[in-house]
């Protein structure tokens, strides 16, 4: 199984220390958000270069670790046009050097009309959708030049809130360089959690061919509130999810979220049991 983690769930450390700690857990696949995980990189804007990328890649390779996704989770419909432009340029910079990191997927969520990425009732409007379309089109154009993929991740509180909305954006941009990081829990909230099977099935029906990476976590519902937890600690239908992965996406990289170094292997074992059935 190709199961990995977010590097920053181990803390923000030197790349050498980070690689060592991840290898100690026998993990070989990571999502790497430089400013969250690597000490000394607080703002990656303008600092990326082939040497730095190769340095990070080679240290990780030495510890048998591959970067599955470069995480650049910024707001590409930021209400401040100047900040939006800065965010777009940071993403494009990651695109240009992704090959030197040994990575082909640069990932992001789909933004909010609020500067702090919080929910805005207008996020589902045509206005927000078109803003995102304009930004994503520019990011995908850059990805096409460098032979890598933009990976988008739908979230119920952002712009692409449903499987249908994700499909609409994929169709409108119409590029194989736009792929999906599928996180079923991000498409589930307190209002629709009883429809999780429909949401998972519909996602594979609508854009299963474009799913490049899986994000794996879980959820619980308590006191009229939905909380996200580590895989195996909640009520996500992992049997359904894993059956669809086995059928439609064999050997896909699965990156866990909401884990800690203490419970990583418990979560891995939980996921793996469904692939052994």
Image (spheres, rainbow, N blue to C red):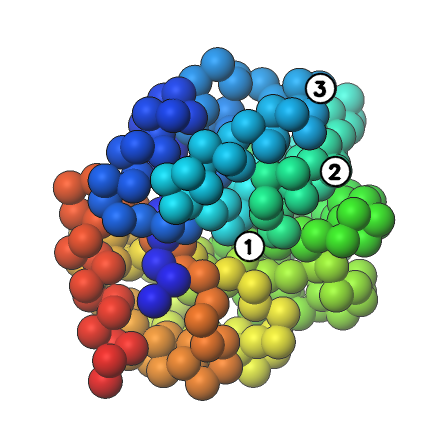
Quarter of the image with the C terminus is: bottom left
Crowding at dot 1, Cα within 10 Å, few <14 / some 14-19 / many 20+, comes out as many
Q: Is residue 227 visible?
A: no
Q: Does residue 102 appear left or right of residue 273 in this picture?
A: right
Q: Quadrant of residue 62?
A: top left
Viewer-proximal residue among 38 and 15:
15
Circle on res. 96: 2
Residue 162 on image: x %, y % = 55, 65
Residue depicted at 65% across the width and 25% down the height: 51
- The residue to which callout 1 is attached is 153
Q: CA distance from mark 2 to mark 1?
A: 21 Å
Q: Secondary structure at mark 2?
A: helix
Q: Does residue 183 appear left or right of residue 273 in this picture?
A: right
Residue 110 on image: x %, y % = 61, 48
- The residue to which callout 3 is attached is 46
Q: Dots 2 and 1: beta carbons under 8 Å?
A: no
Residue depicted at 69% across the width and 36% down the height: 97
Q: Secondary structure at mark 1?
A: strand
First in sequence: mark 2 or mark 1? 2
Q: Is residue 268 visible?
A: yes
Q: Dots 2 and 3: beta carbons under 8 Å?
A: no
Counting every numbered tag in the picture gives: 3
Q: Does residue 204 appear left or right of residue 139 in this picture?
A: left
Quarter of the image with the N terminus is: bottom left
Crowding at dot 2, Cα within 10 Å, few <14 / some 14-19 / many 20+, comes out as some
Viewer-proximal residue among 142 and 135:
142
């Amino acid at each position: 199984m190709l199961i990995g983690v977010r590097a920053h769930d181990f803390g923000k450390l030197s790349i050498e220390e980070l690689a060592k700690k991840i290898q100690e857990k026998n993990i070989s696949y990571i999502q790497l958000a430089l400013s969250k995980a690597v000490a000394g990189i607080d703002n990656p804007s303008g600092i990326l270069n082939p040497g730095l990328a190769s340095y990070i890649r080679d240290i990780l390779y030495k510890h048998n670790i591959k970067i599955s996704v470069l995480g650049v989770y910024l707001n590409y419909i930021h209400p401040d046009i100047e900040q939006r432009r800065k965010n777009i340029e940071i993403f494009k910079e990651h695109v240009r050097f992704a090959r030197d990191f040994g990575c082909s997927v640069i990932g992001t969520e789909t933004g909010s009309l609020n500067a702090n990425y919080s929910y805005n009732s207008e996020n589902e409007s045509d206005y927000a959708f078109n803003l995102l379309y304009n930004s994503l089109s520019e990011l995908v154009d850059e990805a096409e030049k460098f032979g890598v993929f933009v990976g988008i991740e739908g979230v119920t509180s952002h712009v692409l809130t449903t499987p249908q909305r994700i499909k609409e954006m994929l169709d409108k941009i119409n590029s194989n360089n736009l792929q999906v990081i599928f996180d079923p829990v991000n498409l589930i909230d307190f209002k629709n959690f009883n429809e999780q099977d429909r949401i998972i099935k519909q996602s594979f029906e609508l854009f299963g061919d474009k799913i490049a990476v899986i994000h794996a976590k879980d959820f619980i519902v308590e006191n009229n509130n939905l909380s996200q937890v580590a895989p195996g600690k909640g009520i996500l239908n992992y049997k359904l999810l894993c059956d669809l992965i086995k059928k439609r996406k064999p050997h896909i990289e699965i990156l866990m979220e909401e884990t800690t170094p203490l419970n990583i292997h418990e979560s891995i074992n939980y996921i793996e049991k469904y692939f052994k059935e």
